[in-house]
Amino acid sequence: MCAIISSGLVLVVEDEWLVRDVIATDLRDAGWTVLEASTGESALGIIEDNPHIDVLFTDIQLAGQLSGWDVAEAFRAVKPEMPVIYTSGNTSDWSRAVDNSQFFSKPYRAAEILKACRRWLGR
C-alpha cells in the first residue's frame, strides 16, 4: 500500500468495474478523495454536483453515449484549468485531447497515475 502522500478530489470515470475499483482504491490509499462514475452520462452529473473536483481521470472508450473525450470537454467547460488524465487500451486519434492533459495506455501502473495526480496539483 502507498503511504498517505496527497489530498484532493479525483473523479474516476471507467466502465470496467474492477479496473475502476483498483485505481479508486489506490488513489484513496494515497490520501485522495475519489468519486466514481461508470458512464460519461453519470460523470456529467457528478461534475455538476461537485465543482471542486481537482483531477479528472477518464477512460476514453466508455459504455453509453458519451466518451472520455466528451466528459473532458464538458469538465473543462465548467473548470477550464482542470487537469485531465486519459487512459485507453486502444486509441490512436488524439484530435479531441484537451490542453494540459496526459495519457496512459492500459495496462498502466497505479504509481504512474498517482505521480501524475501529484504533478498536476503541485503536491
Image (cartoon, rainbow, N blue to C red):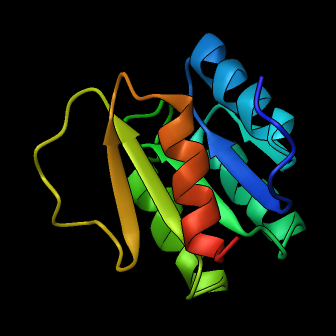
Left or right, residue 120 beside residue 88: right
Q: The N terminus appears in which quarter of the rendering? A: top right
Q: The C terminus appears in which quarter of the rendering? A: bottom right
Q: Position of residue 99 (x, y in %)?
A: 35, 80
Q: Position of residue 89 (x, y in %)?
A: 28, 26
Left or right, residue 88 beside residue 71: left
Left or right, residue 88 beside residue 45: left
In the rendered image, the residue lying farthest to the left is 92
Residue 91 in sight in this render: yes
Q: Residue at x 84, y 33 (%)?
A: 29
Up/down of 91 relative to 41, above or below: above
Q: Residue at x 16, y 66 (%)?
A: 95
Q: Quadrant of residue 83?
A: bottom right
Left or right, residue 83 beside residue 25: left
Up/down of 98 relative to 45, above or below: below
Q: Residue at x 40, y 29 (%)?
A: 108
Q: Position of residue 61 (x, y in %)?
A: 37, 35
Q: Position of residue 9 (x, y in %)?
A: 82, 60
Q: Residue at x 74, y 54 (%)?
A: 10
Q: Nearer the viewer, residue 107 or 74?
A: 107
Residue 60 in sight in this render: no
Up/down of 73 relative to 87, above or below: below
In the rendered image, the residue lying farthest to the top is 18
Q: Nearer the viewer, residue 11 or 105?
A: 105
Q: Quadrant of residue 48?
A: bottom right
Q: Nearer the viewer, residue 22 or 109?
A: 109
